[in-house]
Amino acid sequence: MSALATGVGSMPGTDDREYAEAVRVVLGELSLPHVPELPGRGALATMTGRGLAVVAGLGADLQPAGWRLTDAPGIDHRRARSLLAQDLDQVEEQAQGHAGPFKAQVCGPWTLAATVEKPRGDKILSDHGARRDLAQALAEGVRDHVADLRRRLPGTERLVVQVDEPALPAVLAGAVPTASGFGRHRRVDLPEASAALEWVLTAITESGAEPWVHSCAPDVPWSLVRGAGTRGLSVDLDVLRPHDLDHLAEAIEAGETVALGIVPSTDPGTLPGDTALTERVLRWLDMLGLDHEEASGRLVVTPSCGLAGASYDWARQALRLSGTVAGHL
């Protein structure tokens, strides 16, 4: 089995026309296409806005300081949900007849808790009950989201849902700033962190999709993530630490997927060659002590995180380059 190629999720663009073009590009360039995210369109389309659009049973609205929970969905919350549905309409239209695997992304419970405020201010992260309610509402919303994706992509047998958790290491380290900026929220204990993530990953699995976790931050506790029930780890090669290698090797040996971000996400000064990138992946497998042929079927090649900051031309080239490297593997 050969390696697949996908994107982390975000793409450059600021309007609906560019969103339609992003859908066309991911369908044309990737063996594992994904639902594009264009955060350049504003707060409704950012990772947090998209996550709140999926959450079930909770209301939110956009305040000057950012997203905040409310008693009922505000106009911006309703617009975020409408934009997500509109984008999925575009994906459904262009993906007619698509029979291969497909991926969608959703903001994880801890990154949402670290970026969304309680009704009276300060982050949800500061309140044990509020962060539990948010994680459970996200899990319930993910079930509905997967069902919607299944309806829109009837030919897709392998549906991947990637849970984005860039804030997870900061949450566990007690490094998320308070609203004043002068303090830090208390660290979350590992059992609680694992439980909230497990609720979301279990909802994905029980809905018939394959749960992955992505984080571009250093010092991600991959053992905790794997223990919560993920079947895929999405990482940037440049931020990995030596102690991460054992966890990734164990994941591949256990039949799980590792999506490896190796193609630069922003326009490079010198264009990387597909041969050099392929050799870099093979050297990495050697460091893990894994057989190239056996491991390649569990690898997915991606650009590194942050493709929304690239030019359109480089974003398309980065996805194409990811596909070429995957083909070599």
Image (cartoon, rainbow, N blue to C red):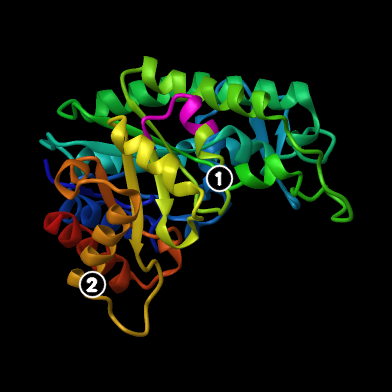
Residue nearest the observer in this picture, 214 or 117: 214
Sequence order check, earlier mark of 1 and 2: 1
Residue 13 showing in the rendered view: no
Which segment did they paint magenta?
Answer: 224-232
Q: Looking at the picture, does residue 155 appear above or below residue 293?
A: above
Label 1 residue SS: loop
230 part of magenta stretch: yes
- Spatial CA distance of label 1 from label 2 is 27 Å
188 part of magenta stretch: no
Dot 1 amino acid type: Val
Q: Which residue is mark 2?
A: 276
Instruction: State left or right for residue 114 relative to residue 265.
Output: right
Residue nearest the observer in this picture, 28 or 256: 256
Which percent across, then down, holds residue 145? Answer: 41, 26
Q: Looking at the picture, does residue 103 appear above or below residue 207?
A: below
Which percent across, then down, holds residue 242? Answer: 49, 54
Which percent across, then down, holds residue 300? Answer: 27, 47
| Image point (12%, 59%), residue name | 328
Instruction: State left or right for residue 169 relative to residue 11.
Output: right
Instruction: State left or right for residue 260 relative to residue 225.
Output: left
- Tags 1 and 2 touching, CB below 8 Å: no
Dot 2 amino acid type: Ala
Label 2 residue SS: helix
Q: Looking at the picture, does residue 328 appear above or below residue 171?
A: below
Residue 120 image label: none
Residue 200 showing in the rendered view: yes
Instruction: State left or right for residue 266 relative to residue 170.
Output: left
Q: Quadrant of the N terminus?
A: top left
